[in-house]
Amino acid sequence: MSLVLDHLWQSSAVLAVIGLLTLFFRNNGAHVRHALWTAASLKFLLPFVLLNELGIYFADLTGLKLPSISAIETLYAAGQVFSDGPFFRVLSGLPVWFMLQGAWLAGIVALLLFWLSRWRTLRATLCAAHDADIAALMPVKISPAQLEPGLLGIFRPVLLLPEGITERLNSAELASVIAHEACHLKRRDNLWAALHMLVEAVFWFWPPVWWLGARLVAERERACDEAVLAAGNDPETYAEGILKVCKFYVQSPLACAAGIAGANLNHRMETIMENRMIARINGLKKSLLGASAAALVLTPLAAGLLWSPAQAAACKIDPVMSSHTLVPYPAESKKVGETGTVMLQVTVATNGHATRADVTHGSGFVRLDEAAATYVWRNYLWRPNACRSTRIPLKVVFKLDDPEGRAPSTRR
């Protein structure tokens, strides 16, 4: 759980930085800001720890030796406030912590089921629709449901139009609406929205994730508005078509079924009617985008590369022997004759505390595995070091002729 909290903190920090970055592009096209917000969304799906482990693996594979870079080490340490600090140890000692984990998982399941029910309704609506003889970049179907024109599907999208729309919108207005949906198709907006819905499901308890979802919808609709106007459609006709859709039809129930009525309608109407010239991205802004993307990827990768075998050997981890007492033998295990050897992988923070104790090879008995991991994690200490969080293998042996488990031996 500490890794999840670290990932949430890191992703939120990236979101804040990208939020500031979008201010530099407020006069540029909405597609640029949507791309930035999408990058922030994808960061919630890509933990920095994966890039960090990739760097460690490459350093181990090649024997690469890099000089220490204090700035990168500082950034790495700042991102480990839970798994590499005292916060998680305090939180994890509370009984309510386990209840919170259960509530988190229950929230994920509940939200996914809620969205699944809405998607099944949309699928049923699509199945009840019939083909339409309307020229478009995607298949077009007419539905008796009074749902706004929308793009349904992620990999093979279909444009679903409500029955009777040709009577409510004139040909120019309908053409502009279809052009808007064609823009969603070209931009693969349904796919990006579905990925962010996954982010919202996993981090449903975190308000910035929902705020980010609203920004994504607002910018994607504005990006499509700009594309429709850039294609030569009349602003007044286009705005009138959107207003009629909002007046007569129900908005799409899912963000991954892109319609036309999303985002702040009043602001959109003002922007459409102004039809301002969109500034092109200059060389300085392009450099800023490239440098930001490189920093996001290369910083965790470099932190892993810096942790080369030579540096790992130089960072000696000394145990505080008084804390390395015998692991108590579970009474129930002794009663039924359970014995075995438990191999642990212990993560030691820079302050010397064991922040994790994972079973890498079990004894064959859950009680023994849990007893070894829990006791080592709660009680064992190492001397603080200035290098970084380190993983240490430990072996715990449970034998019936021992009153307690044997003290773990460290394999280096």
Image: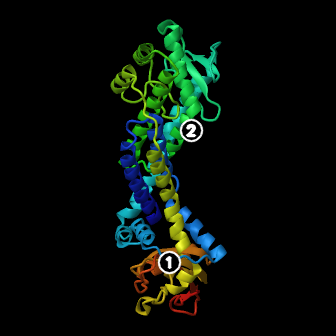
What's the residue at 57%, 83% (across, down)?
310
Q: Is residue 381 left or right of residue 171?
A: left
Q: Can the viewer see residue 339 in this picture? A: no
Q: Which residue is mark 1?
A: 390
Q: Which residue is mark 2?
A: 191
Marks 1/2: CA–CA distance: 38 Å
Q: Can the viewer see residue 213 in this picture? A: yes
Q: Amino acid at mark 2?
A: Leu
What's the residue at 42%, 84% (across, down)?
381
On screen, residue 100 above or below 179: below
Using a 10 Å C-alpha cutoff, classify the residue at mark 2 as few (fewer than 14 neighbours), some (14 to 19) or many (20 or more).
some
Coloring applied to the structure = rainbow
The C terminus appears in which quarter of the rendering?
A: bottom right
Residue 258 percent location from the top left of the image:
51, 29
Residue 46 percent location from the top left of the image:
52, 55
Q: Is residue 175 left or right of residue 361?
A: left
At numbered mark 1, what does the secondary structure look like: helix, strand or loop?
strand
At numbered mark 2, what does the secondary structure look like: helix, strand or loop?
helix
Q: Residue furthest front?
A: 283
The label on residue 141 is none
